[in-house]
Amino acid sequence: MIVTTTDGVEGSAVSSYLGIVAGEAVMGTNVFRDFFAGIRDIVGGRSGSYEKELRKAKELALAEMVEEAEGLGADAIVGVDLDYEHLGGEGKSMLMVSANGTAVKLR
């Protein structure tokens, strides 16, 4: 499956548009990771644990989107957009990644 942020696939023509496909992943974070990330915010530096969770959530969202496109018989997904959100309030923290694109058949 070709997955691209562009509006087409170089060297191939789109023969039909099958519809919008999407995948979402919501990952919970824990108190200790939040605490240490807060310290990183104060002293500077990168939060490896958050980066790892974001990477994992992105991979899950993309895989879910691809699975939906495969179900439609798509050859590719074009115009892919990734969105990241922090959900939750006091004491409840979640990371959400959503992937959206258009499933297409190629000639």
Image: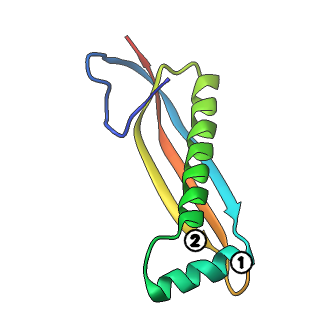
Residue 22 vertical placement versus 38 (above, below): above
Q: State the image coordinates of residue 44 (x, y, percent, origin top left).
A: 43, 82
Residue 107 vertical placement versus 34 (above, below): above
Q: Earlier in the sequence, mark 1 or mark 2?
A: 1
Q: Which residue shows up at 51% across the image and 61% down it?
A: 84
Q: Secondary structure at mark 2?
A: strand
Q: Amino acid at mark 2?
A: His
In the image, taking residue 25 as reference, residue 47 lies left or right, namely left
Label 2 belongs to which residue? Answer: 86
Q: Which residue shows up at 65% across the image and 83% down it?
A: 35
Instruction: Give the alpha-carbon distance from disc 1 to disc 2, as whole Å.
Output: 17 Å
Q: Amino acid at mark 1?
A: Phe
Closer to viewer: mark 1 or mark 2: 1
Residue 14 vertical placement versus 97 (above, below): above
Quadrant housing the C terminus:
top left
Q: Secondary structure at mark 1?
A: helix
Q: Which residue shows up at 57% across the image and 18% down it?
A: 73
Q: State the image coordinates of residue 25 (x, y, percent, origin top left).
A: 65, 53
Q: State the image coordinates of residue 36 (x, y, percent, origin top left).
A: 62, 80
Q: Which residue shows up at 65% across the image and 78% down it?
A: 34
Label 1 belongs to which residue? Answer: 32
